[in-house]
Image (cartoon, grey):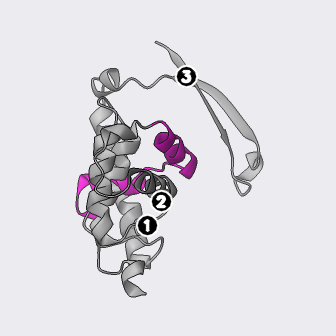
Amino acid sequence: MSLSSIRFTVRKRGGALGGQTIEQEVAAFDWGAFKNTANAEAFVKKAYYAAAQKLARELAEGKNQTEIHHLQTMESLIARSLKFTREEINEWCESRDWERAKFTIEREKAIRFLKENLPSLSSSDFTFRENLRERAAEIVAEVADLKADPIADFLFVKLSQEQKANNIFDLL
C-alpha cells in the first residue's frame, strides 16, 4: 500500500493544537481499491447524509446562500459540499487548451471573462447571470480533461444546476 502525506493547520479555536500545523502519512486514496473496501459504501453514505444535514441546517437558518436546489440532486449536493479554492480554479483555467472550445463572440474576450469569473464559483453560485450560465457550462465541458477532471465537473454542476430566481444580478 502506498502512502500520501497530508498537511493542515488547526484553526486558532481548535483547542490545544490551535494554530499548529500537523503533517501525517496516510494511506493514499485509490478509488478502485476504495470502492471494494469493506464498509466503503457505509462510509460514503454516512458522509453524504452528514453533508446533506449540514446543508439542510444552513437552509433552515438562511446561512451561506444555501438554497433548496442544493439538496435536489446528488450532483448539486456534492458540488455544494466540495470545496475548491479560487487558486485551484485559477490553476485549472490556466492549464486549459482553450482552442478546443467554440466561441460565439471574440475568443480572447470570452476567455478573459471566464478566467476572471470561474474562480468566484468557489464561494458563490451567483457569479454568472442566468443567460450566461448554460454557455459557460458548455465551454467548461469542451475544455475539460477527457479522463477525470473533478474541477471541471464541479464547475459544470455549479453552472448547470437550477437556480432560484434570487440571482443577485436579477435583483439590481
Image coordinates of residue 136 in percent, x first then y, are 33, 56
Q: Between marks 3 and 1, how big is the CA–CA gap?
A: 35 Å
Residue 170 located within the stretch drawn in magenta? no
Above-or-below relation of 10 to 164: above
Find out whether the residues at labels 1 and 2 contact each other: C-beta distance under 8 Å. yes
Q: Secondary structure at mark 3?
A: strand
Residue marked by disc 3: 4
Q: Which residue is mark 1?
A: 127
Magenta residues, as a range? 70-95
Give the x, y percent position of residue 95: 48, 36
| Residue designated by label 2 | 117
Nearest to the observer: residue 21 or residue 161? 161
> Tag 1's secondary structure?
loop
Where 5 sits versus 163, above or below? Answer: above
Label 3 crowd (10 A; few <14 / some 14-19 / many >=20): few
Q: Is residue 72 magenta?
A: yes
Q: Which mark is residue 146?
A: none
In 3D space, how far apart are the residues under numbered discs 3 and 2 (Cα atoms)? 33 Å
Position in image of residue 107 (x %, y %): 38, 51
